[in-house]
Image: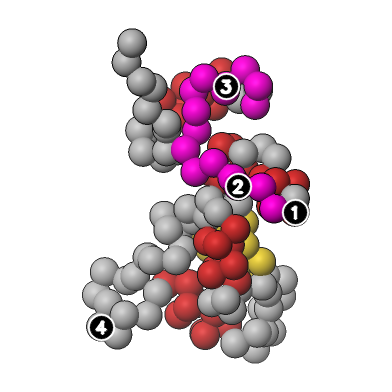
């Protein structure tokens, strides 16, 4: 039966490790989705992809594409850093907010949902 689906996108807390609550075989949610779709349409997923290694491991699950959210908030230049072989930050440094131009509304959300974006701890004086 043709349903006209062009692609499937899954957003998970952590696409590399999230498992169903009633996990009986250890298979991740994203692996189950990829297996079930069986290459009939592209499968994209997002969820705690912060480093190039995370992205590579995610693609290795059989995904067609990996979406970055938090990684791009922390490193707006994530792609160019990776292309140039530079390290990416895995925590947002509040001291760098003016340089990375995070809008005030987004910063308020980040502060309101502690743990959503990992924050670098500021050293006490």
- Marks 4 and 2 sit apart, C-alpha to C-alpha, by 37 Å
Q: Which residues are magenta?
A: 85-100
User: Of tags 3 and 1, which is closer to the observer?
Assistant: 1
User: Of tags 3 and 4, which is closer to the observer?
Assistant: 3
Residue annotated with mark 1:
83
Q: Identify the residue at horizontal 60%, vertical 47% (top origin).
A: 87
Q: Is residue 70 above or below residue 124?
A: below
The picture places residue 49, in percent across and down from the top left corner, at: 53, 55
Q: Identify the residue at horizontal 55%, vertical 62% (top origin).
A: 53
Of callouts 4 and 2, which one flags the residue occurring earlier in the amino acid sequence?
Answer: 4
Residue annotated with mark 2:
87
Residue annotated with mark 4:
24
Say which element carries label 1: helix
Q: What quarter of the picture does the C terminus occupy?
A: top left
- Marks 3 and 1 sit apart, C-alpha to C-alpha, by 23 Å
**Left or right, residue 64 beside residue 30:** right
Say which element carries label 3: helix
Q: Identify the residue at horizontal 26%, vertical 69% (top origin).
A: 21
Q: Which mark is residue 97?
A: 3
- Marks 1 and 2 sit apart, C-alpha to C-alpha, by 10 Å
User: Which of 54 and 67 lies nearest the eye of the viewer?
Assistant: 54
Of callouts 4 and 1, which one flags the residue occurring earlier in the amino acid sequence?
Answer: 4
């Amino acid at each position: 039966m043709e349903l006209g689906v062009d692609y499937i996108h899954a957003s998970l807390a952590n696409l590399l490790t999230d498992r169903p609550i009633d996990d009986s075989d250890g298979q991740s949610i994203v692996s189950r989705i990829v297996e079930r779709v069986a290459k009939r349409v592209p499968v994209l997923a997002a969820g705690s992809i912060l480093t190039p290694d995370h992205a590579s491991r995610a693609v290795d699950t059989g995904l067609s594409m990996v979406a970055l959210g938090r990684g791009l908030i922390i490193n707006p230049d994530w792609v160019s850093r990776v292309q140039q072989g530079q390290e990416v930050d895995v925590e947002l440094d509040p001291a760098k907010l003016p340089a990375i131009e995070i809008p005030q509304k987004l910063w308020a959300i980040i502060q309101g949902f502690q743990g959503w974006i990992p924050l670098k701890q500021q050293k006490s004086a």
